[in-house]
Image (cartoon, coloured by chain):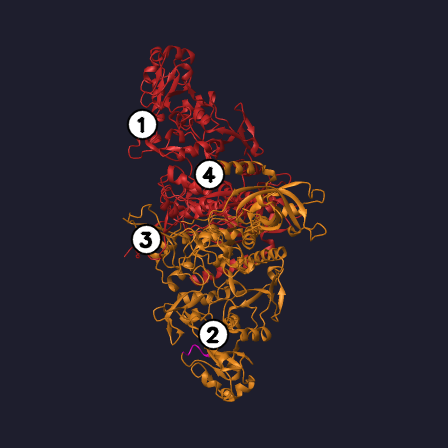
Chain colours: A orange, B red
Amino acid sequence: MLKQFLIRRYQATQSVVEKFKFKDLNSTTSIKNLIDNIDSESLEKKKYTINGWIDKKAKKVKKDLYQTSIRDGNGNLLTMIGSKDQLHGLNLEDCLQITGYLKLRKSTSAAKDDPNDYEVALQDVKILNKVESRIPSSLINLNSIEDIPADFSFLKLRKPKYTHIIQSRSKLKNLVRNYLENDLQFVEVETPLLFKSTPEGAKEFLVQYDDNVENKSNLYYALPQSPQQFKQMLMGSGVSKYYQFAKCFRNETLRKDRQPEFTQLDMEIAFGTGNEVMQIAGNIVTKAWNSYASDVEDAQKLYTLDNQGRPKLVEKEEDILRMDYTESMKKYGSDKPDLRIPLKIINMKEFGGKGGLNNPVFDSFEIIQLPQLIKTSKELNELKKFLLDDLHYNDGSRKPVVYGILSERDLELWHEAFASVGIFESPKLIAKSLNLKVGDVIIGCDRESDSFIFENPTPLGKARTLLYESNISFLNEYLNKNHPKLDKDIVSWMVNFPLMNPVVDETTKKINGYPNYKPKCIESCHHPFTMCQLDHLPLLLKSLESDDLNYRQSLFIKSQHYDLVLNGNEIGGGSTRIHDYKLQSQIFDKFLKIDAKNQEELFGHLLQVFQSGCPPHSGFAIGWDRFLSVLFKTPSIKEVIAFPKSNTGVDELFKSPSLIEKN
Amino acid sequence: MLKQFLIRRYQATQSVVEKFKFKDLNSTTSIKNLIDNIDSESLEKKKYTINGWIDKKAKKVKKDLYQTSIRDGNGNLLTMIGSKDQLHGLNLEDCLQITGYLKLRKSTSAAKDDPNDYEVALQDVKILNKVESRIPSSLINLNSIEDIPADFSFLKLRKPKYTHIIQSRSKLKNLVRNYLENDLQFVEVETPLLFKSTPEGAKEFLVQYDDNVENKSNLYYALPQSPQQFKQMLMGSGVSKYYQFAKCFRNETLRKDRQPEFTQLDMEIAFGTGNEVMQIAGNIVTKAWNSYASDVEDAQKLYTLDNQGRPKLVEKEEDILRMDYTESMKKYGSDKPDLRIPLKIINMKEFGGKGGLNNPVFDSFEIIQLPQLIKTSKELNELKKFLLDDLHYNDGSRKPVVYGILSERDLELWHEAFASVGIFESPKLIAKSLNLKVGDVIIGCDRESDSFIFENPTPLGKARTLLYESNISFLNEYLNKNHPKLDKDIVSWMVNFPLMNPVVDETTKKINGYPNYKPKCIESCHHPFTMCQLDHLPLLLKSLESDDLNYRQSLFIKSQHYDLVLNGNEIGGGSTRIHDYKLQSQIFDKFLKIDAKNQEELFGHLLQVFQSGCPPHSGFAIGWDRFLSVLFKTPSIKEVIAFPKSNTGVDELFKSPSLIEKN
C-alpha cells in the first residue's frame, strides 16, 4: 500500500517538475506574470500550468461543476472551475499543480490586469502533497501571527500579507545594498559571530568553546551585541566605507517587543564626519520608505516636521528635522518623541509654578492640560485607572499626578492635588492664565532642571504617549476631535545628547519614586567610544585631568551622537568615535573606572588599532526589524521575521532551547 | 600637555573632515578616481586632497626635498614630494591627509591612467593619527597573513592584496544577489542562529539560554551547522525561491583549513528539480568566476573538461562536465577529483590482477605507473618517505604500496612487493603488457568492488594528489615534464551518489588498515532529507518494507545529490529532498533507527510541514569562503576572511574564547 502510494506520489511529482524547464519557471509559476502577459488570442486557447495551494474548500456551482481557488507562492489567487472528480476531494492547503485554459469571468467585460477577472477551466489537477494534519481554522482569515498555534506558525508565510512582508524585506535590503555598494562604493565586510565576552556590557549569550557539556572548562565565546568593535577595527584596517546587515544578540529578559537575535544595518566610514553618516543613514531610510510606499496601495511617503511643526515631505536626508536633545526632553519628555502626537507639555515656570519639593534637582513643574475632557467621575476614574495602572510603570518609572475638575470646588482646590510635586506662587492666577474650567483634566509632575534632564521618558513624556494607547472610547473620541494624531509617518533626528549620564543606583533604584543617582558616578550615555563635540573637548579634558571627577561639569559635555526617530521609535543611532589612544584610554580609566590591566584585557585590540594610524571615523546602525515593522505597520517586530522567538526567547516551533543532560 | 595635544589633534581632524562634503567624499579620497579623471589643464594647477597612510619611509632626493608615497583605502599608491618639515618625521602607517598639486613624473612623457606616472607636490600635510606602536616589519612586504603577529593582524587589510580580496568578496556577493533577486526572483530570507540542538549531527556549539554561568540550568540553544531545516520549512511555508548568505558553525577539532564559523550561499526552490538547482548554482559560480577573471590581470576564466578530457571554457552551466560517482571513484579514487591532474589509475583486472586477499570486498587491484621516474635508491627512498609519511594518514586512511624498479631483478620480482594486496595470474605478462622498465615506480593497492566503492579517497586516489604536493625536486620536474597539471581551473559536477553508506565502526576503525563496516548498519551518505533517484524508489521502498534490512541492496540505491567540484575542492552540494511525511519518517525509523518519539522531538517541526502540503523541492549550498579561496588563489580560506580564527578556533587578535569564572 505505502509502496504503491509513494511511487505514484513521487512519479506525479517528478513528471510535474520535469515539465518545468528552468527558463519557464518564473513565468509558469506566477499568477501575476501569467495575467500580466495574457493576450486575448491565448484566452480559452492556450493551456497554462500553475503550482500552488488550495485556498478555499471547493463549492458546487452547477451540476458536476465545482469552484475554488489556487494560491501561488506570491500570495496571488486565481479562481478555478472543474469537475467533482477534480476538485471535490481537495482540502485547504493541499499542494497541487493545475493545468487548464484561462478565461474571463462572466462578471467582467474586458481583459484587465487583475487575477480576479479571470478563472481557469481545469484540464488536469495533480496533487503534489496532500494535507495530512488538521490545518488550524485561525489560519483562514489570519490577522495576527499570535492567532496561529506555534506548531503551524510556519504557515503564516503562505498568507498574502506575510508573503508580501517577506518579499518586501528582501527587496528593500537589496535596494539598500545597491545604493551603498554601487552609488557610494561601500564594501560589505562580514564580522565574526563567535566574539569575546565583555562582562561590562549588557547581558550576552555565552557559547561553550568545548564541544562537550560534561567538560567543565571555563572557556567561552560570546555572541556580539553589535559589530561595534569590529567595525572600528576595520577603520583602522584601512577599510574606508564598511557596511553589513549584521546579526546581533541580546540576552535580556525581553522588554516589550524585543527579540534575542535581530538584524542591524551596520556601517562606518573613515575620514568621515557625523554629518556625512547622517546623510547616508537618512537617505537609506528615505529611499527604502519611499520605494515601498510607491509600490504599495494606501502606503504614504515619509514625512518630517518643518520649523512650524507642520508635516513636510522627506525626499532626501536634508529635509529631516534635527531636534536638540534638551529641547525634546523639555517639549516631549522623551529623546524619541512620537511627533505625530500634537499634545504639548507646558512648563509652569512662567505661570509661577515650580518643583523641587522632594528633590532639589527636580526643580521644574510641568503639565499637560486636556480642556473639557470629562463629564463624570466615572470617566475620571476610568482615565486615572488607565494612566496610573502599575503595568505601565513596571520598569520602575515614576507616575504623574492626574487631576480632573468635576466641580467649581475642584477648580478652586486644583493645586492641592499637586502639593506633593509642585509649589505655586498663586494657584488662582494660574487657573485664570490657563483658563481652567470644570471638565478639564490636568496631568502634572515635577522634573529635572532644564539643562540636566536624564529621567527619560519623564512622567509627562510617558503620559503624552500613553493617552493615545488606551481603549477608552470617550478619550479616543476627544483626542481624535481636539488633538488628532497626524496621519503621516514622521521622522526626525535627535542630536546634542549628553556624553555621560549619572548612574542610577539599581539597589535603591528609587527614592520616593525619584531616580537615585550614585554620588560622583557617571557612565557613557551611549557607549564609551563616542566622541564629544569639539567645542566641549576642553571641558572633557579638564574633567579627565582633575583628580577629583567634576561630576556636575562632566554631565554638561555634549556628544557627537545622533539618533534617528520614527513615529516614536528609535530606529537607528550613530556617532563620531574617539580615534585617539590616549583620550580613549583616559575615558576608560577616569570615567568608567577600568584600570590599565582590564583595559588591555578587554579592549587591548582596539587600543592597539588606535596606536597604529587609525583614521578619524563615524558610523551608524539601523535596527532593521524595527524599521520594517514601522514601515509595514505591523503590531510587533515578530511579524517581519520569518521564524521569530517568543518574548521569553523561546522558539515554540522548533522547541528550542532544549534540555541537554549533563551526566 | 595631553590637553593641548589632544585639542590640536582633534581640531586638525575636525577641520580636515569638515572639508569633505558628502558629495565629494568618493572622488576626493580615491587615488584611482583622481587619476582616472585628471585632465592636462588641472595638472600642476588644481589642488587635490587625499587621505591615507604613509607607505614607505621618506627618502631624501635633493636638498630639502623628500619623497615617499601615500596609500589610500583602496590600496592604491601615489608618490609625493615635499620638504623635510613635511615628510621627514613621518613613520610607516601614519594616517594623514595631504593637499597638493598633481604633476607627471619625469620618467613619463604623456598622461596615462596609472598612478605610477604621477606625483603630488605637497602643499600641506595634516597628521590625523600618528603611529605610537612598533609596526612589525613583516607587514612591509606581506606575503601571507601567517607572517603577521596576531596583535597586528588587522593591518593586513591595509595591504593592496588583501584590500582587493575584501573588496572583491563584497562585489561578488552583490553580483550573485542581483542575479538571484533581479534575474530569477529569489527572495532572501534570514533564518535564526539560535537554533535547536540536534545531538545526532556533527558536534555543535551550545549557547546557554540563561544569562548566568552560575545558573546550572540545562537549557541550551545550538548554533546551526547550516540552515537546512529552516529552508525546507520555508518551502512548506510557500516561499518559492529562497536564498541567503548564511553563517554556519561547526564545532570540530578543525581539519586542515577549516573555520569554526563560515559563510554559505544557501538556496532552495519549491516545485523544482535537481537540474534546475544545478543550473542556478552552476551559473552563479560561472558568473562570479568570470566576472572576477575579467577584472583582474593574469586571472583566467573558468574551465571544465570535455568528453575527451580536454579543457573547455565554461560560459554557462550546461558546459560543465557531469561525472558519475562510480566512474570518478574508479578513475580518480575520489568523489572530488582534482581534474587538473592528468595521472590515471589503472585497474589491473584486464591484466589479470585482482585484490580480495585480506577482505573479499576489496576485490580490485589498481596501480598508478610512473615510468622512468627514479634513478637511484636515494630518490626512491625520498619518494617513499614522502608518500608514506604517517602525517598524511592521521585521519586513519590506508597507505598504498610504493615500489621502485632499480634493477633487472626488481623488474622480475615486482609482484612480490604487492603480494599482500594483489593476486596476479601472470606477473611476467603484466610486466610486459605495462612495458615495465628499470626506473619505473608503481604505486598499487586493492580497493572495493567497482559498484561498491565507499572508501574515499582510495589509497591511490590519495596518492594521485599527494604526488603533486611534495617539495621533492626530481619528482616535480618529472611530473611537470611528463604529467603536467593543467594550468586551467577545472570545475565539474559529481552526480549519482549512493543514498546510504555503510557505517564505519569507529571503535575498531580499521582492521589491517581496511575500514571495518558495522554489520547491517547504514547511514545517509549526505543527510537524511535526500531523495533517491526515481527509478530506485521501488528498491528503496522494498528495503524499507522488509523487516530485516537488506544491507547490500540498500547500498545500491542512488540519490538525487550533486556536488560541485573545483580543482579538487568540493565547493558546493545540493539535492532534491524528500517532501513526503511517510517516506521521511520511514527513513528515520528503518535506516537511521530514530524511533517515533525521537522523531517527534528532533524533527517534529519538519514532519509537520510535510503533512501540511509541502511542495516538492530541491536546494543547494556553496561554501563561499572555500570558493573565494580557490578563485583568489589564496593558500588558505583564512585569507578571504576579515577576522579569521586559528586552526584550533582561537581568535588571537581579540583573545577569544576567554576564561569566565564560575563561582
Q: Can residue B268 be seen at all in this image of the molecule?
A: yes
Q: Where is residue A194 in the image (x, y as percent from the top left)?
A: 40, 49
Q: In the rendered view, would you say B278 is above or below B660?
A: above
Pointers 3 and 4 in contact (C-beta within 8 Å): no
The residue stretch that appears in magenta? A359-363
**Residue found at x 43% / y 22%:** B345
Pointers 2 and 4 in contact (C-beta within 8 Å): no
* Image quadrant containing the N terminus of chain A: top left
Residue type at numbered disc 2: Leu
CA neighbours of label 2 inside 10 A, class few (<14), some (14 to 19), many (20+)? many
Q: Dot 2 corresponds to which residue?
A: A387
* Distance (Cα) linking label 2 and label 1: 78 Å
Q: Looking at the image, which is closer to me, B376 or B223?
A: B223
Labels 3 and 4 share a subunit: yes
* Distance (Cα) linking label 1 and label 3: 41 Å
Labels 2 and 1 share a subunit: no
Chain at numbered mark 3 = B
Q: In this view, does A430 lie to the left or right of A358?
A: right
Q: Dot 3 corresponds to which residue?
A: B218
Q: Dot 4 corresponds to which residue?
A: B626
Q: Dot 1 corresponds to which residue?
A: B513
Chain at numbered mark 4 = B
Q: Which mark is residue A520?
A: none
Labels 2 and 4 share a subunit: no
CA neighbours of label 1 inside 10 A, class few (<14), some (14 to 19), many (20+)? few
Residue B244 on the magenta segment: no
**Residue found at x 42% / y 37%:** B526
Chain at numbered mark 1 = B
* Distance (Cα) linking label 1 and label 4: 31 Å
Q: In the rendered view, would you say B336 is above or below A488?
A: above
